[in-house]
Image (cartoon, helix red, strand yellow):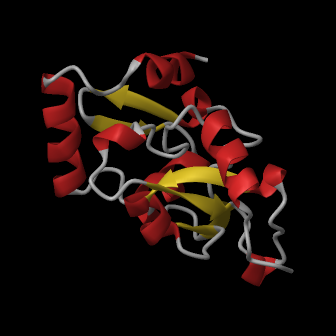
Amino acid sequence: MSRWVSAQLRQTVTIRADFLCEYCLVAEENTFYGCEVDHIISVKHGGSSEVDNLAYACAICNRYKGSDIGSIFWATGEFSRFFNPRTDRWAEHFQLEQEFIKPLTIIGEVTARILEFNDSARLHEREEMIRFGKYPNEVALARMMR
């Protein structure tokens, strides 16, 4: 499997995501490190570089996710996959409560924990973006509602 993603494919993924991280829904323009194309199922685990296996992710979400595809839900000891922006609806797995991204499902829980959605620095960053009216933007808000 090739890891290479062409410029045209990167552009397709970026536009489809409306320049938002498809995990935490921060707008690329509001991130210090920008956004990157993420393999939802990493090449290491057999994923492809096809458009249906790619997501737009802020550098922080992408760094924490790495090549992982899921984690252990500690309450039961069972493995759970991560949130998949191609097949899952954000609002089914997460809810924004002020600056806190509250997980609603096991998938939401393991995703929020591993991607560190509610790390103190990320909470502070979202709190400031909310204060200045930058989070969630209109596009992110629509995704949070559907």
* Left or right: where 121 falls relative to 45: left
- Tell me where residue 89 appears, x and y as whole percent: 66, 32
Q: Residue furthest front?
A: 7
In the rendered image, is residue 134 in sight? yes
In the rendered image, is residue 74 in sight? no
- Tell me where residue 2 appears, x and y as whole percent: 82, 79
Q: For this rendering, which residue is in front, 115 or 140?
A: 140
Q: Residue at x 43, y 29 (%)?
A: 95
Q: Quadrant of residue 40?
A: bottom right
How many tags in the picture? 0
13 w.r.t. 47: above or below: above
Q: For this rendering, which residue is in front, 25 or 88?
A: 25
- Tell me where residue 50 appears, x and y as whole percent: 84, 59
The N terminus is located in which quarter? bottom right
* Left or right: where 89 falls relative to 71: right
Q: Residue at x 16, y 35 (%)?
A: 127
The C terminus is located in which quarter? top right
65 w.r.t. 142: above or below: below
80 w.r.t. 16: above or below: below
* Left or right: where 77 falls relative to 122: right
Q: Residue at x 80, y 66 (%)?
A: 49
- Tell me where residue 30 appears, x and y as whole percent: 30, 40
Q: Quadrant of residue 98?
A: top left
